[in-house]
Amino acid sequence: MRSLLTLLLIYVCLCSYGQTVNGVVTDERTGRPLTGAWIATSKANVITGIQGEFSVVGAKTNDTLRVKMQGYKLYVLPLNPANNKNIRIGLEAAIIELNEVHVTAKRDRVKDSLNNRKMFAKEFNASAPKLKDIIVVSGSNAGLLPVLVSRLFPPSLSGP
């Protein structure tokens, strides 16, 4: 009876203990490794390395592994103790379609210029910094002002 209770306790501890999940994320069509894919479980989030490899520590037995990457479909894998080592995940590319595109050869340069001026009015109306913007006089640095002015405008350049 005691040994059965001990085995049951060991089994419960192992099931509740977080497992390490290792694997590689690749493109399903080309087989190339994908760098920067987001791997998420309920307890941990990791990003794939340069060769598409990942290692998630602390994954539970009944947890799910979610793999996301821009331009690819979401991949969901339920975890079990049998498939925690060297998982190879192939992500399928997501197809992005445009509904309709209009291309015209005629262009009104004046209208485009006016639209650009409206959009970027703040940048177009910028002015160059003045001398008072460069040199700031404060209580502690008041003694440095004559030195800065003499370096900016040396007396030898002012005339004969």
Image (cartoon, grey):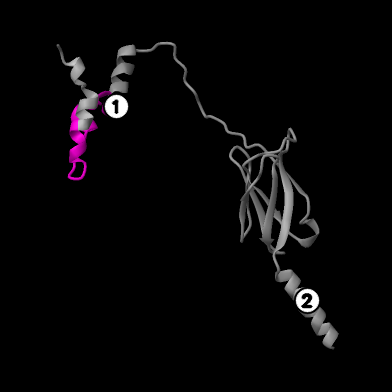
Q: Which secondary structure, mark 1?
A: helix
Q: Is residue 99 left or right of residue 32?
A: left
Q: Image point 78% across, 56% down: which residue? A: 83
Q: Image point 34% across, 12% down: which residue? A: 109
Q: Which residue is mark 1?
A: 123
Residue 73 x/y as whole percent: 63, 42
Q: Is residue 86 left or right of residue 65?
A: right
Q: Image point 66% across, 43% down: which residue? A: 49
Q: Is residue 134 magenta?
A: yes
Residue extending farthest to the left is 160
Crowding at dot 1, Cα within 10 Å, few <14 / some 14-19 / many 20+, comes out as few
Where residue 44 sits, quadrant-wise, is bottom right
In depth, the one of 148 and 82 nearer the eye is 148
Q: Is residue 116 visible?
A: yes
Q: Is residue 127 visible?
A: no
Where residue 157 sits, quadrant-wise, is top left
Q: Image point 63% across, 57% down: which residue? A: 41
60 vs 93: above or below: below
Q: Look at label 1 and name its amino acid.
A: Glu
Q: Which secondary structure, mark 2?
A: helix
119 vs 71: above or below: above
Q: Is residue 39 magenta?
A: no
In depth, the one of 133 and 100 nearer the eye is 133
Query: Which mark is first along the chain, 1 or 2?
Result: 2
Which residues fall within the magenta stretch? 121-146
Where residue 147 sits, quadrant-wise, is top left
Q: Is residue 149 left or right of residue 71?
A: left
Q: CA distance from mark 2 to mark 1?
A: 68 Å
Q: Which residue is mark 2?
A: 10
Q: Look at label 2 and name its amino acid.
A: Ile
